[in-house]
Image: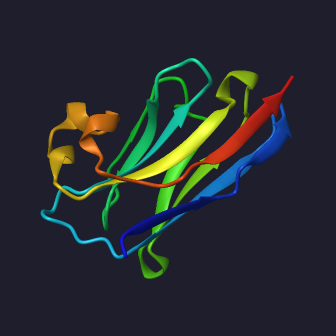
Amino acid sequence: QVQLMESGGGSVQAGGTLRLSCAASGLTYSSSYNYIGWFRQAPGKEREGVASIIIGGIHTDYADSVKGRFTISQDNAKNTVYLQMNSLKPEDTAMYYCAADTRGLGRFAANRLRPFAYNIWGQGTQVTVSS
């Protein structure tokens, strides 16, 4: 069964830290350009890309709003991708989702933070940052 399971969300004060985890199982990939991405969606707003990482590699992409504060990484042995979030701000409050691109659309750089490029999605984990 193909599955992505997020964990690690919670409530923190501004300036705090959280680490999100995305455990993947049952995924098969079509190319060497498959990515795992983290996305977020706040109430009344569109889903936006936060960070992505090429599966099995080191290439990463970040949204400008999180550069220098968030870090995406992976543990291939555990099939898990992490999102370390530091210096959190109230505007980071959202439901956070991880997603997998198993079709190789991430070979185009412009796609790597675009929701349409990802075909497998987790259920999400809530992050709330208070001021």
Residue 3 lies left or right of residue 85; in this view the side is left
| Residue 106 placement (x, y as % from top left) | 21, 46
Residue 22 lies left or right of residue 118; in this view the side is right
In the displayed orientation, state which residue is furthest to the top: 44
| Residue 22 placement (x, y as % from top left) | 53, 61
Residue drawn at x 31%, y 62% is: 55
Residue 43, quarter of picture? top right
Would residue 85 be seen by someone viewing this image from the given angle?
no
**Closer to us: 55 or 8:** 8
In the displayed orientation, state which residue is furthest to the bottom: 77
**Closer to us: 119 or 59:** 119
| Residue 66 placement (x, y as % from top left) | 55, 30
Residue 22 lies left or right of residue 88; in this view the side is left
From this view, report whether residue 41 is shown above or below residue 32. Answer: above
From this view, report whether residue 99 is shown above or below residue 47. Answer: below
Residue 21, quarter of picture? bottom right
Residue drawn at x 49%, y 79% is: 78
Residue drawn at x 87%, y 22% is: 131
Would residue 80 be seen by someone viewing this image from the given angle?
yes
**Closer to us: 41 or 82:** 41
Colour pattern of the rendering: rainbow
Q: How many marks?
A: 0
Figure quadrant of the N terminus = bottom left
Residue drawn at x 39%, y 46% is: 52
| Residue 31 placement (x, y as % from top left) | 12, 62
